[in-house]
Amino acid sequence: MITTDPRPVPPEPGAVPAARELFVRTVEIDDVGDLLAALPRADPALTFSWVRRGEGVVGWGEALRIETAGADRIAAADRAWVAAVSAMTVEDGVRLPGTGPVAFGSFAFSAGSPAGGVLVVPEVVLGRREGRTWLTTVRAEGAAADELGVDELGVDELGVDELGVDDVGHARVGATARTLSPTPVTSPGEVRYADGALSAREWSAAVAGVIARIRAGEVTKVVMARDVVATAQRPLDVRHLLSRLAAGYPGCWTFSVDRLVGATPELLVRREKGLAACRVLAGTIRRTGDDADDLRRAAELARSSKDLEEHELAVASLVRALRPYCASINVPEAPFVLHLPNVMHLASDVTGVVDGALGHPSTYRTHTPGGSGPSSLALAAALHPTAAVGGTPTPAALAVLAESERMDRGRYAGPVGWIGADGDGEWGIGLRSGEIAADDPHRIRLFAGCGVVAASDPAAELAESEAKLQPMREALV
Ligand SMILES: C=C(O[C@H]1C=CC=C(C(=O)O)[C@@H]1O)C(=O)O
């Protein structure tokens, strides 16, 4: 484990700790079925996921941990990752996004939050893309096979015993990997809910106060979030939450990083082969469950001046932040309506060609033509917080929300995702999520936020926040 926590002395810009030498090996394996069902352990601190429509990466164990804090938390993690990767020996016979070394990360929404930021390289990563499945194992250089602790890692279930260990102590996994047999998944049992920082009534009053400040011209848009605390009868098995989220919300990115769990519909940024892609969401209407009525509501959302204004602000702020990093940007003329099981959103997919002359051109290991320029994490650092989670203009909106929400958001609404050795990766916005307490595995804080503009109504925003809490409430059943 390495730690780059800049407290008490902030690091010099560009300073990174000495990285631990790691040996990383990716091999192609037979399809193992549901990636999430392969996760061997219940522990939310050591179980990682970034899965959408059955594809993505999951991981378990901890080979390397990078911790950061403060305003520089995302960029510092990016620098530490470059140093960590440079100390790795990599054997990657698959060479797809998500193969080779992968770090899962999660960052606090606010610079001042004690939640800081973290990148973790799991000991085992299992991935699937376009019908190909791979397994990556990570161990300290020179470690003996028993130090790898294959039983602990759950890799033994892949048939390692039979296939043996290679000359560098690495589990050899053949093309005939057997089905994984993780420990049984447990459900949470009875779940009790309690108010978070504010009761529903107090939060509505706070929203009314923010609307008044917006109407007075202090800010244009503020995203107001609230939290609810759920306490389960049994310790939370993160796999239960992940499988329910993925089944209920297949179009969202189902994530688990360092106790933050959720299914986000919003992609902060993906960088792949020199292209950046962002999905901006802002403007929401609840679904009723009646298809005809939902279609009528979707049309209403697409015409709603309140929602269109909220959406335009979000797109404009994202484009402003992304432009300096891109040689060209494509912004759709109008948003589309994204249908999720609980809500519909106005959505815009913004893409850009990353400027390869910027960033750390020589520091990333490159196996793709686009492996130079700002990494996915550097782009996430530049884009966070978007107007979809902060507001407009950003500094004033952040000040208003901090005063009005009266809570620390922790990692909610911060970047969450993964980065590979070449800097490519995917970072979502940590929405529709909850953070499992470090000191009590029964407790999880759920979050939901709503973009508040001059035309907002507190009761409607409260109802919208309830709809946004639905995925996590359903996952806890
Ligand atoms: C802040 C959240 O949603 C954002 C993303 C999509 C639509 C939003 C809205 O319409 O208010 C929010 O900006 C949340 O889900 O907690």
Image: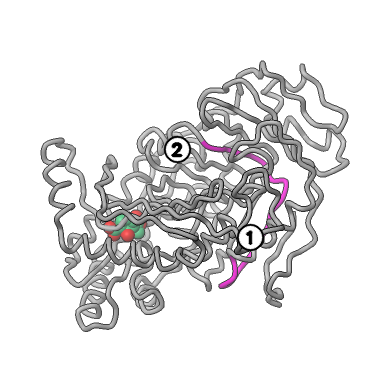
Q: In this rendering, would 122 be left or right of 265? A: right
Residue ID at (63%, 44%):
368
Q: In this rendering, would 145 be left or right of 77? A: right
Q: Name which of mark 2 and mark 1 comes first in the sequence.
A: 2
Residue 57, image x, y percentages: 56, 38
| Structural crowding at the residue carrying mark 1, measured as other residues with C-alpha within 10 Å and reported as few (<14), some (14–19) or many (≥20) | many
User: 460 and 355: which one is in front?
Assistant: 355
Amino acid type, label 1: Asp
Q: CA distance from mark 2 to mark 1?
A: 24 Å
User: Residue at label 2?
Assistant: 52
Membership of 65 in magenta stretch: yes
Secondary element at tag 1:
helix
Residue ID at (49%, 63%):
410
Residue 155, image x, y percentages: 69, 29
Magenta span? 56-73
User: Residue at label 1?
Assistant: 78
Quick check: which quadrant has ligand 1?
A: bottom left
